[in-house]
Image (cartoon, helix red, strand yellow):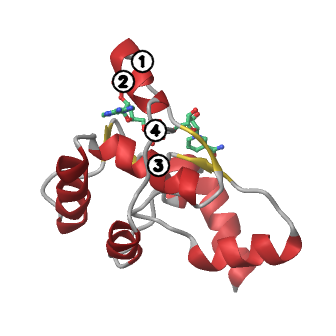
Amino acid sequence: MSPLWQQKDLREFCKAKGIHITAYSPLGSRGAKWGDSDSLEYKVLEEIAKAKGKTVAQVSLRWLYEQRVSFVPKSFNKDRMKQNLEIFDWSLTEEELNEISKLPQRRGVLPSMIMEPSDLVREIEAEI
Ligand SMILES: NC(=O)c1ccc[n+]([C@@H]2O[C@H](COP(=O)([O-])OP(=O)(O)OC[C@H]3O[C@@H](n4cnc5c(N)ncnc54)[C@H](OP(=O)(O)O)[C@@H]3O)[C@@H](O)[C@H]2O)c1
């Protein structure tokens, strides 16, 4: 889950059932590089980040925090780890939250990224 894959239906379902969500790939990781800096979605997040003197990663993590989910960001870099922790003493405005809620959605992790081809065949067979 991330601003680019907000999982609104799943969140509503979990809320109704009292299930807590933990977001993996909270920075919208796709392979080695997270996000796509040329995309419109990224530009919207970048504008918000610039206006607040934060980074796109911080805006994404703050958005998750404000959705009351927990999240598991990954970094091998000490400065980015620190940056990812500095999201608790500021907040997104209603307008910013509204802009983020309108971002086009794309699945962060495709089944093919985490499954063997044989698992996919079983998935397809199960759906038929
Ligand atoms: N259970 C599952 O099926 C499942 C599936 C996917 C992922 N996960 C877990 O979820 C966690 C995160 O997954 P993920 O690696 O896919 O996604 P992620 O946390 O969304 O993204 C990690 C990527 O973002 C970069 N990054 C981190 N902080 C940054 C920042 N402040 N600014 C710019 N770039 C930043 C990292 O690079 P650097 O290291 O260079 O900073 C890395 O390339 C991991 O613990 C993973 O094991 C679980």
Q: Which residue, given by chain and number where applicable, does mark 2 sit on?
A: 80
Measuring 56% from the left and 48% from the top, which residue is drawn there?
114
Tell me the CA gap for discs 1 and 4. 18 Å
The verdict on label 2 being within 8 Å of ligand 1 is yes
**N-term mark: 1 or 3:** 3
Of circles 2 and 4, which is in front?
A: 4
Q: Position of residue 43 (x, y in %)?
A: 17, 60
The extreme bottom residue here reads 128
Tell me the CA gap for discs 1 and 3. 20 Å
Residue 120 in the figure: left or right of residue 91: right
Q: Which mark is residue 76?
A: 1
Q: Position of residue 115 (x, y in %)?
A: 59, 51
Residue 111 in the figure: left or right of residue 95: right
Measuring 42% from the left and 21% from the top, which residue is drawn there?
82
Above or below residue 102? Residue 7 is above
Q: Which amino acid, mark 2?
A: Arg
Q: Nearer the viewer, residue 34 or 84?
A: 84
Q: Secondary structure at mark 4?
A: loop
Q: Which amino acid, mark 1?
A: Phe
